């Protein structure tokens, strides 16, 4: 009996030693794997395998108060730079605009027209490229001699995703009586292109003037803001959850873009909220510093709603 136990123990130790050698970092096969991943000492695949966190369903009876809010994320702010960089996709990371474009082109993500933020009018990937000036298009140019508008076909002039400097979010704030908390759900994302208007440039013939807003009404070069498309956030979440965003403090623990939106790791300002005037924007009834004051007033009104429900 003792001999049998000794033989079993011997084979167990031998097997464990062979397994340890096979898994050792100096093993030939493992060494080849390290060479194939020169950007990191270990393989990073946690985020690539991640799925979006399932949000609990909302009963209509529990949402006793709600408000639709449109807000803008400006990627030029330091807190929002992870949405803008890297400009050229790397093996590990892509910026938000490239992720959305790739999702629309290759992964079945649906883009919707900017004139309909209720997600009922789909548009194609080619339509988006035209808005980014990524191909030939027909524009109206003013003749310097006659002053008349003339049609002209021009090649690509835009710089692609580098001009997407803002993202608009459509979200719904609601008070959940079941948890007695003020909650928010993001409904849609809309990239906004910010570019220079040339003095002799009027507008592409197929471009909707209502989706393009000028910062100033001058004949010289001016900044234009053009909404490109809407995507439904819940449809985009499986794609955003597998894309890594930069973490300034720790390269080993990077969040996904879905985490950033759900945990609200971004800076933004309110530009519009639901109202009786066809949900008109703040810029439609006030200008300058008054827009900032009105934006802050709406934010305080929403946050104060929860506090006003408590009584001591």
Image (tube, helix red, strand yellow):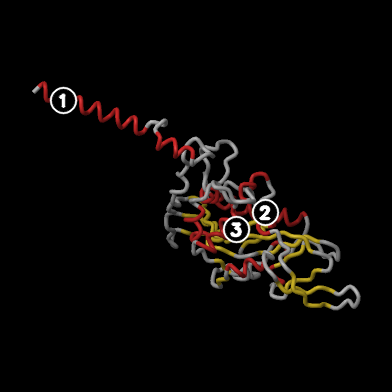
Work out how far the residue at label 1 is from the one at label 2, CA to CA, in angstroms.
80 Å
- Does 47 sit left or right of 22 as displayed? right
Q: In the structure shown, which secondary structural element does the residue marked by tag 2 occupy?
A: helix
Give the quarter of the image for residue 119.
bottom right
In terms of sequence position, does the residue under pointer 3 or pointer 1 come before the other?
1
Residue projecting furthest to the front: 28
Q: List the residue tagged with mark 2.
A: 297
- Camera-nearest residue between 150 and 289: 150
Picture coordinates of residue 176, whole percent (x, y) = 47, 55
Q: How far apart are the alpha carbons under marks 3 and 1?
A: 68 Å
Q: Which of 206 and 299 is in front in this view?
A: 206
Give 11 or 89, whichever is nearer the viewer: 11
Reading the image, the residue beneath label 3 is 169
Residue at 72% from the left image edge and 68% from the top image edge = 155
- Residue 22 locus on image (x, y percent): 34, 33
In-front residue for pair 179/239: 239
Mark sitting earlier along the chain (3/2) = 3
Question: Judging from the image, what secondary structure is the residue with disc 1 in?
Answer: helix
Residue density around tag 1, few if under 14, some if 14–19, many if 20 or more, within 10 Å: few
Locate residue 221 relative to residue 80 in the image: left or right: right
The residue beneath circle 1 is: 7
The answer to whether 114 is drawn above or below residue 18 in the figure is below
Q: What is the distance, in whole Å, between disc 3 and disc 2 at their CAs?
A: 18 Å
Residue density around tag 2, few if under 14, some if 14–19, many if 20 or more, within 10 Å: few
Residue for point 62% across, 54% down: 301
Q: Residue furthest left?
A: 1
Place of residue 50 in the rendered image (x, y in percent of width and height, measured from the top left): 44, 49
Which quadrant does the N terminus fall into? top left
Where does the image place residue 183, in percent across and percent down from the top left? 51, 53
Q: Give the number of the disc on residue 51.
A: none
């Amino acid at each position: 009996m003792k001999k049998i136990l000794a033989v079993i123990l011997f084979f167990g130790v031998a097997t464990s030693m062979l397994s340890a050698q096979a898994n050792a970092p100096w093993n030939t096969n493992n060494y080849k794997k390290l060479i194939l991943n020169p950007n990191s000492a270990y393989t990073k695949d946690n985020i690539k395998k991640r799925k979006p966190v399932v949000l609990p369903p909302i009963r209509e009876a529990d949402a006793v108060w709600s408000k639709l809010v449109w807000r803008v994320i400006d990627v030029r702010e330091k807190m929002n730079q992870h949405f803008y960089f890297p400009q050229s996709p790397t093996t590990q990371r892509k910026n938000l605009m490239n992720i959305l474009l790739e999702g629309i082109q290759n992964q079945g993500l649906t883009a919707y027209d900017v004139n309909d933020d209720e997600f009922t009018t789909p548009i194609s990937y080619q339509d988006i490229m035209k808005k980014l000036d990524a191909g030939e298009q027909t524009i109206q140019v003013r003749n310097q001699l006659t002053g008349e508008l003339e049609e002209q076909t021009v090649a690509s002039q835009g710089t692609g995703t580098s001009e997407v400097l803002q993202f608009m979010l459509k979200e719904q704030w609601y008070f959940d009586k079941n948890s007695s908390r003020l909650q928010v759900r993001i409904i849609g994302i809309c990239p906004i292109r910010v570019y220079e208007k040339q003095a002799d440039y009027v507008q592409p013939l197929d471009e909707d003037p209502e989706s393009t807003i000028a910062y100033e009404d001058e004949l010289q070069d001016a900044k234009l803001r053009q909404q490109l498309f809407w995507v439904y956030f819940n449809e985009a979440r499986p794609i955003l959850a597998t894309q890594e965003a930069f973490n300034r403090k720790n390269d080993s623990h990077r969040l996904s873009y879905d985490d950033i939106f759900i945990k609200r790791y971004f800076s933004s300002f309110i530009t519009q909220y639901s109202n009786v005037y066809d949900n008109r924007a703040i810029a439609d009834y006030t200008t300058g510093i008054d827009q900032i004051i009105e934006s802050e007033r709406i934010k305080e009104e929403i946050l104060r709603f929860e506090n006003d429900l408590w009584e001591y």
